[in-house]
Amino acid sequence: MINHSETKPMDFLFDIGNVIVHVDFISSLKKLMPDGIDEPDNRLHRLLERKDEFEAGRIPPADYFPWAAETLGFTGKLETFMEAWVDIFSPNEPMWNTIQELHRTKHRLILFSNINEPHIHFLQKQYPVFQCFAGGIFSYQTGHIKPEQEIYQLAIKQYELVPERTIYIDDLPANIEGGKKADLICHQYQAERHDEFLNWLNGII
C-alpha cells in the first residue's frame, strides 16, 4: 500500500522487463532450435550480442529476424518464430497493483524501455495494465539504448520532466547509474523484494 502524503502528483519512468513483467527470453528461444544442433549456447550468444543494436533501431526487423532464425538453426515459418519471440513474458502482479494505484492517484506514468517493436506491441495488446501509461520512450524508435545519456535526455525533453520530481524504476544497475547521471530519483527494482520498493516509495511521495 502506498501512503500519499503529497498533494502534487509526480512523474514516473518505468522500465518494462523484470519490472512490469517477468521475462524468460532464453527458454523461449531454445524451443526454436532443433534437437542436437551444434553449439546451442554459442548460437544464443551470437543472437543476443546483436539484440541491443536491433532494439536501438540500428538493424531493421526485415534483416534481424531472418538472420536470428538462421542463427538458431530454425527452418520453420517466420510466423512460428515470431510467436516464440513474443511468448516470453508473465505478469508481475504486485507491481501491477502498484501501477494501478499510482494511476488512480493521478501520478503520470511513462514507459522507458530498451525494447523492440514486436515486444511492445504484444505487451500493449495483451496486458491492460499498460493502459495506465501516458506514453513511452522505446529504444527502437530512438537510435539509442539505456544507459546512453541521449535516451534519458530525450525522455526528459519529450515529456517535459523535472528530474528532481521524476521517479525512475529499473532492474539493471547500469541503467540506474544512467538515471542518476540524469538527476532522476532512482530505484533499482527486484521483483522478489517488492515490499522494499514500496517502503522506499513511501519515503518519496
Image (cartoon, rainbow, N blue to C red):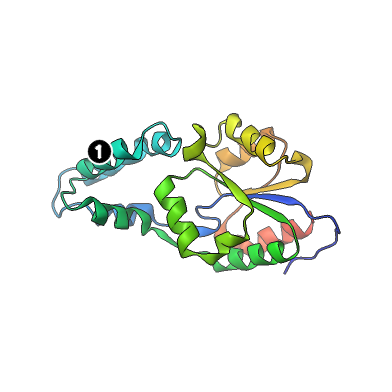
Q: Does residue 47 appear to the left or right of 130 in the view shown?
A: left
Q: Which residue is mark 1?
A: 67
User: Mark 1, residues whose alpha carbon is within 10 Å: few (<14), some, or many (≥20)?
Assistant: few
Q: Residue at x 47, y 52 (%)?
A: 120
| Horizontal and vertical percent position of residue 168 | 66, 47
Q: Quadrant of residue 122?
A: bottom left
Q: Which residue of the protein is positioned furthest toward the left in this rendering?
A: 36
| Horizontal and vertical percent position of residue 21 | 50, 59
**Above or below, 114 relative to 149:** below
**Above or below, 119 relative to 2:** above
| 79, 30: nearer the viewer | 79
| Horizontal and vertical percent position of residue 49 | 35, 36
Q: Residue at x 57, y 64 (%)?
A: 129
| Horizontal and vertical percent position of residue 203 | 79, 56
Query: Which amino acid lies under the numbered mark 1 shown in the image of this protein?
Result: Trp
Can residue 154 be seen here? yes
Q: Does residue 3 appear to the left or right of 58 in the view shown?
A: right
